Structure formats: structure tokens, C-alpha cells
Image (tube, coloured by chain):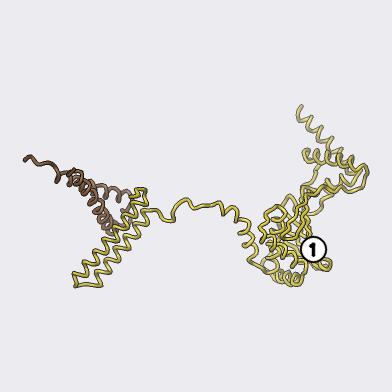
Chain colours: A brown, B yellow
Amino acid sequence: MGRTLAVLTGLACGILLAGAGVGLLIPLLPRAWRSEQLVWTTSATLVALCVGAALLVSRPSRR
Amino acid sequence: MKNRERRGVGSIALLVVAIGASTGGAARAESAHGAPAFGAVSCRAGDSSYAEIGARASAKETGRTGQSGSEVRRAAQVTRSDKADVTFEIRPAAGGAIELSGRSGELQVKKTVQSSGDSVLELSTPHDRVTFTVTGQSTSVTRGGTTVELRRSAAASDESDRVRRLLADSQALLRFRAVNAALIESDDRSPASLAFITSDAVAGLLTGDVGAPRRIAQFMARPGQSNVRRAGMVMDCYSLMETRMVDAWNDYMGCVASVLGYSYFQDLCAYRWVVQNESYWFNFISCSGFNF
């Protein structure tokens, strides 16, 4: 239960972070580099990192 | 062998046409001499199919009337537009032409369209008579014994001014345009009505109503346009988000520059940018199909 909640929190944070990341990436990149694929790849990477971090943080301790 | 047979049929047809032409007016209606205007499609000796059709029709009509020299008037298709108060008659004419007549009160209209697309429009009231002749080469207007011709190849001249002056006080034309206005108003899209309305574009243009062809084109295109639905957005989801995010970033930079030296206000600019950005991001996600 605790882990599921952590993963869901990580997912929500990842989506929010992806929004901010994309919002930074698009205006700062040259026009030729901007593309929908880049946006989806970046956001998916950020979400995956956040969910992964949430999984790591919520892993059961040996103690 | 086949060629010889064809040649034989052709010569027989030629013979029948020649006999028909010499015996009755009905045959003359189908012959080349029956349709002198505009060189409409007619029976030619060299063209066996036309010759055969012409010969059969001539023989039939001569047989039906039973007397030579009488003109055969083909049956007309009669329709009426009550709203515009017009009665139309459409009938095939000689040489593959179509003849359309219309009557509205004192106004009598007769339009003849040849297979080549050339047309003659005759408008008449008890005291006025106007004839428009439209061919591939020119447009002629005749009224009261005066004819003005506008040639397609000629450079701009004052002939169009003469046409406007010629038609300025024409009761027949005024009545014709009023009838067409009523037909358009009643949304009558029957073939006869559209033939009248097409002529109204020409008449309107010649009398100085330069917007008439466009208005009539829009009227004619309206049923087709009503079935057209936009298949997609003007901008796709990504382009919309990109534009908005770039604008938001420019806003943020402007905001920061305007409060330079005040870090608290600069933070507020950043918060505003985050809120805008997240809004555009979730808009993009929902627009792409992930409707959270």
C-alpha cells in the first residue's frame, strides 16, 4: 500500500516535472530541433526517472 | 469485310438523310441547315452515327405528322415556381440544343443553349426586347435595332459603357432580374431555374452589377459547402503547445526584466510561468488523447 502510494506520487511528480521540463526545453532549443517526438521522449524519461526514484525510496529496508 | 459493311451503312444513312431533307420540314430540323446559329452539332454525311440517328428521327417524325412541310414541335417539360411566379418549359431543340422558355407576367424569356455552350437569351415585354448572344468569341447585346458586341480578344474599350447605357432603361431586363432575385430568394434549384439564374449573372455584369457573378456562384456552391465539415483543428496539438510555451517564456523574460533587482517579484514571475506552463502541458496531453 505504502509502495503503491509512493509510485503514484512519483508518477504525479514526474508528470508535473515533465511539464516544467518541456516548458523550459521548447523555448530554449533551436526551432529546427523542436519536435513532438522530443517532447514525448523527454517527458517519458522524466516520468520514468521519478517513478524509479519513488520505487527506490519506498523499497523495504533490510532492518 | 467489316469496313465494307460500315461504308455501306454510312452511304445508306446519307441517302435517307438526303431523302428526308428533300421531303419535309421535320427532316430539315435535324439537318445541318436547320441549326445555322453557332455551328451546333448537326448531322454530317461523314459521321455515320449522327446520320443514322438523324435519319431515324426524321423518318419517325415525318411518319407521325403525315404531312410534309409541317414543323414538329417537341414535347416540353413544364415546371412552375410559385414563389417567383414563373412557368418554365424545357424542350430539346434542333442540333442538340436545349430551349428553355419562361413566362412571368408580361415578361417572356427564351434561352437557347447549344451543345457547344453558346447561348442566346431573349427577354421580351410588350414594349421592350433585349437579346444577349454569348459565344466563345464574344458577347453581343441587341436592343431596339442596336447591337453592341464585346469581343473577348479585344482590349478594354468603351463598348461595355455602351452596353450599360443601352440596357439602362430596359423594362424587360429589370423584370428578368427581379424574377431571378425571387428565384434565388425561394432557393429554387431546379435545372430551369438555375439556367435563368446563370443568365442573371451575365445580365448583371453587363448592366454594371459587378458582384452578381460572385453572388450567384456562392448561391450555387452553397449546397456543396453545407456538406463540408472541418476534419481537424487549424493547428495541431503540438504546434499549439509550442506556440503557447514560447509565448509564456517570452512573457516570463519580460516580467523578470521589468522587476530587475526585486527577487521577490521575480519569483512571482516564475510562479506565473510554472502555472501557465503546466496548464499548456496538461492541455497538450488531453488534446493528444490522454484525457485525464
Up the image or down, B224 lies above or below B67; here it is below
Please state which amino acid type lies under the numbered disc 1.
Gly
Which chain contains the residue that carries disc 1? B
Tell me what residue is drawn at x 17 percent, y 44 percent. Answer: A2
Count the marks.
1
Up the image or down, B62 lies above or below B179; here it is above
Residue nearer the viewer, B62 or B127: B127
Residue at the outermost right position: B67
Q: Is B28 on the left-hand or right-hand side of A12? A: right
Note whether residue B19 is visible.
no
Tell me what residue is drawn at x 9 percent, y 41 percent. Answer: A61
The residue to which callout 1 is attached is B105
Category of crowding for the residue at label 1, using alpha-carbon neighbours closer than 10 angstroms: few (below 14), some (14–19), many (at least 20):
few
Up the image or down, B1 lies above or below A7; here it is above
Give percent across and percent down for residue B66. 92, 42
Residue at the outermost top position: B1
Note whether residue B48 is visible.
yes
Mark 1: secondary structure: loop
Tell me what residue is drawn at x 30 percent, y 49 percent. Answer: A40
Give percent across and percent down for residue B6. 78, 32
* Residue B222 position by quadrant: bottom right
Q: Is A62 on the left-hand or right-hand side of B270? A: left
Residue nearer the viewer, A25 or B84: B84
Give percent across and percent down for residue B127. 83, 68
Give percent across and percent down for residue B9. 81, 33
* Residue B283 position by quadrant: bottom left
